[in-house]
Image: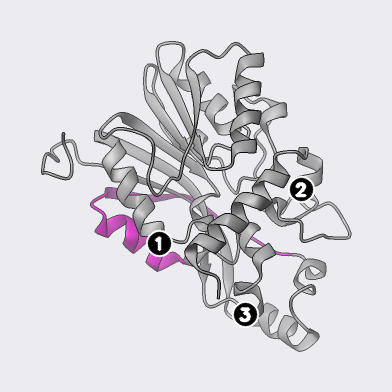
Amino acid sequence: METQDQIKEMVKQKYAEIALQDKEQNQSSCCGSGCCSTEVYNIMSDDYTQLEGYNADADLGLGCGLPTQFAQIKKGDVVIDLGSGAGNDAFIARHETGETGKVIGIDFTPAMIERARQNAEARGFNNVEFRQGDIEKMPITSNVADVIVSNCVLNLVPNKDGVFKEIFRVLKPGGHFSISDIVLAGELPTALKTAAEMYAGCVAGAIQKEVYLELIEVNGFSNITIQKEKPIIIPDDILMNYLNEAELASFKNGQTGIFSITVYGEKSASCCGPDCCS
């Protein structure tokens, strides 16, 4: 079993490759992971094209939801996008927050940061900034964000508890998050859980839905709400790369479910303890 550092390095390498591809190439694999299918599948992502602020050049087809659609961003807000990729969610957030707001994207893959910065510069977006960093230790001071969004990223991070602690630290009192992610109901087959490609493909790193929601609650958030939920169906020709016929039949006929959820949570406006207000 890989260590957390090995998993993170593998994810970084995979997403560095993805940064050099276009959306069509990424959609022909499971979440851009490179586990090839015989057809082009848009397995995870929802359709962004109707949202104001959408930029096709920044859309690599790597998401599993539309968190910016549910994030209740207001004009003038400071918004942070965790795992910002080529900038798609950040640019949609910019449309919502307007010229008086600010959007900061964080990604730990240098190639993604470079691509996002090029996209922002080409559009003259002076209030969108991209910082290279680990979302388990954000390069952001405490209590600065009105809203945090993230799209299919926390499932890639081994220390999800650490990320939620950081989200709580960085949000202003009264701030909130809207995060789309992959969660499970039941246990994945061992072959899927240990496959590096499936980890980079947003599946093997997912945890149980109940555990995910408990992590949010124990880290101090309130008004936790599932804003959207949809099942994720992985095509057989992808699963057959990892499972034999018997394992595939057992998986498909079993109780395991893979879901995309968009979750909302708030940091209390009255929170002013030593770990809340600076």
**CA separation in Å, label 2 and label 1:** 26 Å
Lower sequence index among marks 2 and 1: 2
Work out whether 102 lies above or below 204: above
Q: Amino acid at mark 1?
A: Tyr
Q: Residues within 10 Å of mark 3 (few under 14, many from 20)?
A: some
Q: Amino acid at mark 3?
A: Pro
Residue in the image at 11% along x and 44% along y: 274
Circles 3 and 2 in contact, beta carbons < 8 Å = no
Horizontally, is 231 left or right of 82 in the view? right
Residue highlighted by disc 1:
212
Work out whether 244 lies above or below 15: below
Q: Residues within 10 Å of mark 2 (few under 14, many from 20)?
A: many
Which residues fall within the magenta stretch?
Answer: 208-234
Residue highlighted by disc 2:
27
Residue highlighted by disc 3:
189
Q: Residue furthest right?
A: 38
